[in-house]
Every structure is written in structure tokens, then in C-alpha cells.
Image (cartoon, helix red, strand yellow):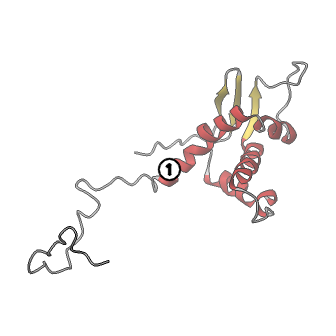
């Protein structure tokens, strides 16, 4: 069963110990806005899938991240979530991985499940009607060593 979140309110997501981000809900509109971003649209066909994933995560992060806690500069001063700071945060491998698996993957899992359609009770063909005629007799099996090469 799909869990519908009818709230449009932002929520907090813990990425790694001490770092959490406040995010807009991952909606169709947000994903389409990220896909339509010029940075994504202008990518060369030669860009690797891994590089595309990083660029897409940064674009989506800039659209989705509203606030954060536990992010500061080298002197420990809190940093605001600007586009440049979001890109820098997502350049940190554990942060990127947590963002991908805990935020982005939710949408991808639903897509992979094909809108979470439940399988039929006794298999995918339970409602299908047979159209082939039954075989007249059983097929002859090949004996070992009798096959021509």
C-alpha cells in the first residue's frame, strides 16, 4: 500500500550524525522542476551516469532544502543553505549518499514498483484466458549424446 502524505509542510531529515535538513515534500512538481533545470538539460551525452546523479542531486537539493542544522564553515560558524553551500554539502560522500537513499530513493522506489500495484492473488496471469490449443502429445526429449553438432 502506498503511504500518501497529504501534508505539503516541509519535514526534517537526519542525514548523518549532527546534520539534518529541512526539505520540501518530494512531489512530482519538484522532480519535474529539477529535470527541467538548464543545468540538467544542457548536459552532454558523454557525461557519465555517476556525474549526472551528482548534478541532479545538487539541482534537486537547491530546490528542496529550505534550512539545515549542523552545517558550518571551517571555523564552526553556521552557514546558511545557499546554492553554493548546498552544492558543497552534497559533495561530501556520506551526505550525498544519505540524501540519495533517504530522500530521492523514495520516489524511485515507488516508480520501480510501478505505482505499487499489488500482484494478483495467484500470479500475474490469473485473469488471463488461454488461447493456445493443448498439445496432442508430449514432446520427445533429446537423449544425451544424440544431438548433432
Q: Secondary structure at mark 1?
A: helix
Dot 1 alpha-carbon crowd within 10 angstroms: few under 14, some 14 to 19, many 20 or more: few
- Which residue in the rendered view is the most extreme toward the top? 76
Q: Quadrant of the C terminus?
A: bottom left
> Which residue is rendered at x = 87% and y = 40% of the image?
84
Tally the marks.
Answer: 1
- Which residue in the rendered view is the most extreme toward the right? 75
Q: Nearer the viewer, residue 44 or 37?
A: 44
Q: Nearer the viewer, residue 43 or 33?
A: 43
Q: Quadrant of residue 68?
A: top right
- Residue 52 in view, yes or no: yes
Whole-percent x and y of residue 74? 89, 22
In the image, taking residue 119 as reference, residue 133 lies left or right, namely left
Q: With respect to residue 4, does 132 lie above or below?
A: below
Q: Quadrant of the N terminus?
A: top left
Whole-percent x and y of residue 124? 29, 60
Q: With respect to residue 118, does 133 lie above or below?
A: below
Q: Circle 1 sits on which residue?
A: 110
Whole-percent x and y of residue 34? 72, 54
> Which residue is rendered at x = 28% and y = 56% of the image?
120
Q: Nearer the viewer, residue 127 or 135?
A: 135
In the image, taking residue 118 as reference, residue 6 lies left or right, namely right
> Which residue is rendered at x = 66% and y = 37% of the image?
97
Q: With respect to residue 134, does 52 lie above or below?
A: above
> Which residue is rendered at x = 79% and y = 64% of the image?
44
Q: With respect to residue 133, does 24 lie above or below?
A: above
Amino acid at each position: 500500500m502506498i503511504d500518501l502524505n497529504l501534508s505539503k509542510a516541509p519535514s526534517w531529515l537526519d542525514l548523518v550524525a549532527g546534520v539534518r535538513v529541512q526539505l520540501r515534500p518530494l512531489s512530482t512538481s519538484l522532480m519535474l522542476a529539477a529535470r527541467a533545470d538548464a543545468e540538467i538539460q544542457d548536459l552532454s551525452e558523454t557525461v557519465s551516469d555517476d556525474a549526472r546523479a551528482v548534478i541532479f542531486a545538487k539541482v534537486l537539493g537547491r530546490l528542496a532544502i529550505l534550512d539545515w542544522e549542523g552545517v558550518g564553515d571551517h571555523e564552526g560558524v553556521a552557514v546558511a543553505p545557499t546554492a553554493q553551500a548546498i552544492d558543497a554539502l552534497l559533495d561530501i560522500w556520506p551526505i550525498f549518499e544519505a540524501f540519495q537513499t533517504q530522500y530521492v530513493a523514495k520516489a524511485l522506489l515507488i516508480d520501480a514498483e510501478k505505482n505499487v500495484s499489488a500482484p494478483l492473488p495467484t500470479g500475474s496471469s490469473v485473469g488471463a484466458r488461454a488461447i493456445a490449443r493443448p498439445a496432442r502429445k508430449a514432446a520427445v526429449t533429446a537423449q544425451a549424446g544424440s544431438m548433432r553438432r
